[in-house]
Image (cartoon, rainbow, N blue to C red):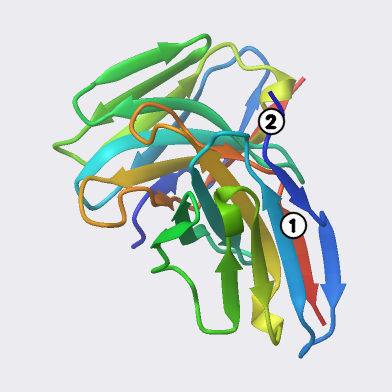
Amino acid sequence: SQQGEEDPQALSIQEGENATMNCSYKTSINNLQWYRQNSGRGLVHLILIRSNEREKHSGRLRVTLDTSKKSSSLLITASRAADTASYFCATRYAGGTSYGKLTFGQGTILTVHP
Amino acid sequence: EAGVTQFPSHSVIEKGQTVTLRCDPISGHDNLYWYRRVMGKEIKFLLHFVKESKQDESGMPNNRFLAERTGGTYSTLKVQPAELEDSGVYFCASSQELALAGYTFGSGTRLTVV
């Protein structure tokens, strides 16, 4: 399996519901980031959590990180139709010369129905 | 501040031709990255510049790809000669401080090789 695998691959919910996406990774990391991509657009950085942090909030977003399980989750509360997009987790490796490289997961396609 | 700008947004070329993609990072961002997403696969790292120097080019697929960042400002990615499997979306990103913030991505260049 790939570094930064995500599940589910696709998620369909109604407006107002919460959406939870999970990400697993393999190597030691410096930080883990979540990005959103709207159709045909670039990646937008949502939130970054460092390896020594366990939980972080930003508006309607809540990210958790469990380094012992090498996993993270992104929770979007009270979803809106505008949240419809692909969501990617990306990890930054903890050491070596590839310190700037992000390793992305396959992404979760979230559809929020009005 | 202006974001990361990429052009062209779309390019359709024939197999064997040459294409040059350009990326203008956020002014003052020393770190510049190229990524690509081939159809149906994950977003993959190509290389990382720090100013004008190549910090990490471990993701460059082969010697048909040449990236430059003369003067440490904008960057170009040349594919010569292009092959069918080079089709995909090429993203550029920039960042200042690596550890504290996420990366700012451009909207990407969709390359189609026919």
Q: Which of these two is toward me, A1 or A51?
A: A51
Relative to the observer, which residue lies in front, B54 or A12? B54
Q: Can residue A11 be seen in this view?
A: no
Q: Give, as a three-letter code, the residue at label 2.
A: Thr
In the displayed image of the protein, which residue is found farthest to the bottom? B16
Judging from the image, mark 2 belongs to the subunit labelled A
Front in this rendered view, residue B16 or A24: B16
User: In x, y percent, where is residue A46?
Assistant: 52, 26
Q: How far apart are marks 1 and 2 (CA)?
A: 22 Å
Quarter of the C terminus of chain B within the rendering: bottom right
Residue A84: mark in rendering: 2
Q: Seen in the image, is B30 located left or right of residue B85?
A: left
Location of residue B19 by image quarter? bottom right
Q: Which residue does the image show at 79% across and 72% down from the upper left? A: B112
Q: Which mark is residue B109?
A: 1
Tell me what residue is drawn at x 37 percent, y 48 percent.
A100
Question: Mark 2 Cα within 10 Å, few/some/many (few <14, many 20+)?
Answer: many
Secondary element at image label 2? loop
Q: Quadrant of the N terminus of chain B?
A: top right
